[in-house]
């Protein structure tokens, strides 16, 4: 049985995370690796129910602290029901957002203490972190334009202002600098095919 791996895709609005997740499944399948795509918030029945609460409604529907708690609850169910079983069965898991999005959106941009978010993660998800995190770096203005074109304005988070999304981008830059063993910074201004190639090339040590 192949060794299971856990990859996350992170970044701001419109960075192409969902596109890359699908492309990676195909690229890995061509190399004989079975991968599944999942997402946050969501990915399991319970987490998808919480997703509806988090993503719909006015931008001010929840405080950042309330959001952090809801994300942590969704993630706990997701990890228990989907991610850990898949890794244990030898599959690769590609997750569209994970705990670093909470750290960036509710933490750096929303004002929730990073240590508190990580404490919730340690309790709810037993501290599970990805083997590698691919940060799709894109200027927030370009990301906002892509998101607006894609879905006509986006969800509660996409609707927030420029300062909020600039803080999110700075947070991801900081995470990538602080955790080079886990993080890979990918230029998301490149064509989608080039972004996929960059990620697959970085995975070469696990695909040999």
Image (cartoon, rainbow, N blue to C red):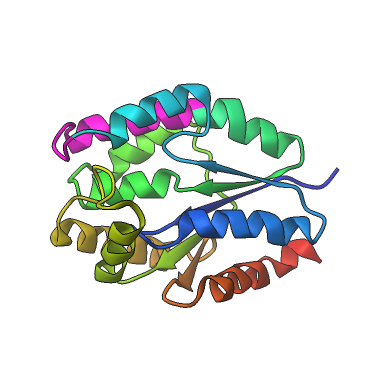
Coordinates of residue 101 in the picture (x, y in percent): 36, 49
Q: Which residues are magenta?
A: 58-77
Q: Is residue 116 left or right of residue 160?
A: right
Is there any visible trace of residue 138 in the rendered image? yes
Say whether residue 130 is magenta: no
Coordinates of residue 94 in the picture (x, y in percent): 59, 49
Residue at the farthest right position: 1
Q: Is residue 29 above or below residue 142?
A: above
Residue 168: which quarter of the image? bottom left
Q: Quadrant of the C terminus?
A: bottom right
Is there any visible trace of residue 124 in the rendered image? no
Q: Is residue 88 above or below residue 104?
A: above
Q: Quadrant of the N terminus?
A: top right
Q: How many marks?
A: 0
Q: Which residue appears at 46% of the width and 33% of the height?
A: 42
Coordinates of residue 54 in the picture (x, y in percent): 30, 33
Residue 85: which quarter of the image? top right
Q: Which residue appears at 47% of the width and 57% of the height?
A: 17
Residue 102: which quarter of the image? top left
Q: Which residue appears at 63% of the width and 33% of the height?
A: 84
Who is closer to the viewer here, 5 or 114?
5
Q: Main secondary structure of the magenta part?
A: helix
Q: Is residue 153 left or right of residue 204?
A: left
Coordinates of residue 65 in the picture (x, y in percent): 21, 33
């Amino acid at each position: 049985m192949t060794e299971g791996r856990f990859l996350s895709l992170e970044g701001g609005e419109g960075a192409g995370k969902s596109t890359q997740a699908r492309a990676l499944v195909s690229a890995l399948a061509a190399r004989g690796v079975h991968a599944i795509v999942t997402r946050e918030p969501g990915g399991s029945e319970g987490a998808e129910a919480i997703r509806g609460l988090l993503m719909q409604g006015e931008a001010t529907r929840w405080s950042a602290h309330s959001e952090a708690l809801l994300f942590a609850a969704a993630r706990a169910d997701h990890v228990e029901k989907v991610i850990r079983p898949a890794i244990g069965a030898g599959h690769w898991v590609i997750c569209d957002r994970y705990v670093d999005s909470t750290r960036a959106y509710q933490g750096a941009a929303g004002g929730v203490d990073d240590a508190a978010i990580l404490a919730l993660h340690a309790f709810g998800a037993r501290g599970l972190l990805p083997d590698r995190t691919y940060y799709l770096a894109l200027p927030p203005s370009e990301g906002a334009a892509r998101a607006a074109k894609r879905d006509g304005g986006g969800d509660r988070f996409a609707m927030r202002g420029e300062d909020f999304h600039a803080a999110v981008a700075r947070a991801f830059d900081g995470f990538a600098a602080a955790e080079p063993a886990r993080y890979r910074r990918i230029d998301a201004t490149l064509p989608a095919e080039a972004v996929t190639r960059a990620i697959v090339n970085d995975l070469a040590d696990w695909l040999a």
